């Protein structure tokens, strides 16, 4: 089981969109995925159409180490995709909820999550405080989506330095994923700078700017079932291929199958709905 923290001290750079999309893509292609919403804004819980539930990650932080593993397991909620589960968050999730920064790691280990999941993705709030460090301690890899702007790029070196100070063993950034990319000179110059600063750790795949991400989030839809032929979805297929070494063709085949099943299901539902209405009339 891989535990991956999605992190960036900057806000609004695409952390939640990345976590939700990659988790959905992996789940749709057969992996068992747990998403953990570690942000009081609970955007990931909303994106996966689950909303705020109880118990949540806050209860896991508040509980002592004896009670917390049971609470973590009972806070797991199913999403609209069979292979994708989530531990939701809530507005009360403040930094002060974290006593021991290794609590989440201990709790996850005690649960034996690797019996149930291939991947755990932890979505984080912006910042580098106790909540984020708790996720860093619990994970094996750190993925950093970033925008291609001066301060966003400059800040990543400082961010990694802080991460390594606070967590010398696990604070190294594994991958940087350029988001909101357009093929313009300024963006390409930032990519070149990132490659110099983080050699071998910047994905070759860049996530293009695409309004589809806002669209599916607003409408509560699943990118790969409703807008598979968008530029945005194609970027995520490439990312799954690059980050998790899966054949692109195999990913497309699985997604096309699932989309086909979804369309058939919806057509049946509409047909039976209409038939029931006619019978009532
Ligand atoms: N590649 C993209 N193209 C267009 N819009 C995008 C892209 N990636 C993300 N967005 C949009 O940008 C906004 C911010 O994205 P998101 O919420 O994922 O950022 P975040 O880093 O999680 O924010 P926060 O720091 O507040 O948690 C959302 O409206 C999302 O739909
Ligand atoms: Mg977010």
Image (spheres, rainbow, N blue to C red):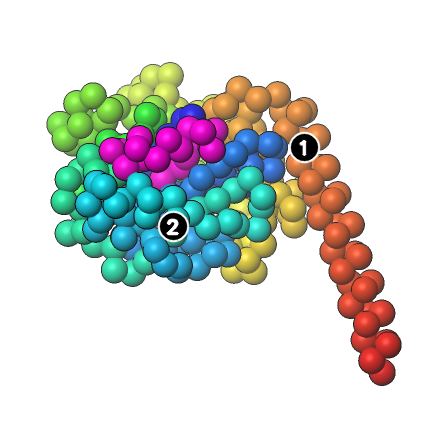
Range of magenta residues? 105-126
Using residue 150 as the reference point, say whether residue 87 is left or right of it.
right
> Is the CB of mark 2 within 8 Å of ligand 2?
no
Q: Residue furthest bottom?
A: 281
Q: Are marks 2 and 1 in contact (CB under 8 Å)?
A: no
Using residue 101 as the reference point, say whether residue 185 is left or right of it.
right
Numbered disc in front, either 2 or 1: 2
Q: Earlier in the sequence, mark 2 or mark 1?
A: 2
Query: x, y (%) of residue 73?
Result: 38, 44
Residue denoted by label 1: 254
Q: Residue at x 61, y 32 (%)?
A: 29
Q: Depth check: 150 or 168 in front?
A: 168
Q: Can residue 86 be seen at all in this image of the molecule?
A: yes
Query: x, y (%) of residue 255?
Result: 66, 36
* Residue 107 among those drawn in magenta: yes
Using residue 57 as the reference point, say whether residue 246 is left or right of it.
right
Residue denoted by label 2: 75
């Amino acid at each position: 089981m891989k535990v991956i923290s999605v992190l960036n001290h900057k806000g609004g750079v695409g952390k939640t969109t990345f976590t939700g999309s990659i988790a959905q893509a992996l789940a749709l292609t057969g992996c068992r995925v747990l998403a953990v919403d570690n942000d009081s804004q609970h955007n990931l819980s909303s994106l996966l159409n689950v909303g705020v539930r109880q118990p949540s990650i806050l209860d896991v932080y508040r509980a002592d180490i004896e009670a917390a593993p049971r609470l973590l397991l009972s806070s797991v909620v199913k999403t609209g995709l069979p292979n994708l589960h989530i531990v939701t968050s809530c507005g009360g999730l403040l930094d002060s909820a974290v006593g021991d920064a290794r609590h989440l790691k201990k709790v996850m280990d005690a649960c034996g999550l690797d019996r149930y999941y291939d991947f755990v993705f932890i979505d984080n709030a912006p910042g580098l405080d106790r909540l984020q460090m708790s996720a860093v301690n619990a994970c094996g890899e750190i993925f950093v989506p970033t925008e291609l702007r001066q301060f966003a790029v400059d800040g990543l070196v400082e961010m990694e330095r802080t991460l390594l100070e606070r967590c010398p063993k696990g604070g190294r950034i594994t991958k940087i994923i350029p988001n909101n990319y357009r093929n313009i000179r300024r963006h390409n110059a930032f990519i070149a700078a990132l490659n110099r600063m983080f050699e071998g750790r910047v994905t070759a795949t860049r996530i293009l700017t695409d309004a589809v991400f806002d669209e599916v989030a607003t409408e509560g839809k699943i990118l790969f079932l409703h807008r598979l032929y968008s530029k945005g979805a194609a970027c995520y297929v490439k990312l799954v291929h690059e980050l998790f070494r899966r054949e692109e063709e195999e990913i497309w085949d699985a997604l096309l199958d699932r989309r086909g099943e979804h369309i058939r299901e919806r057509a049946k539902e509409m047909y039976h709905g209409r038939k029931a209405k006619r019978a009532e009339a």
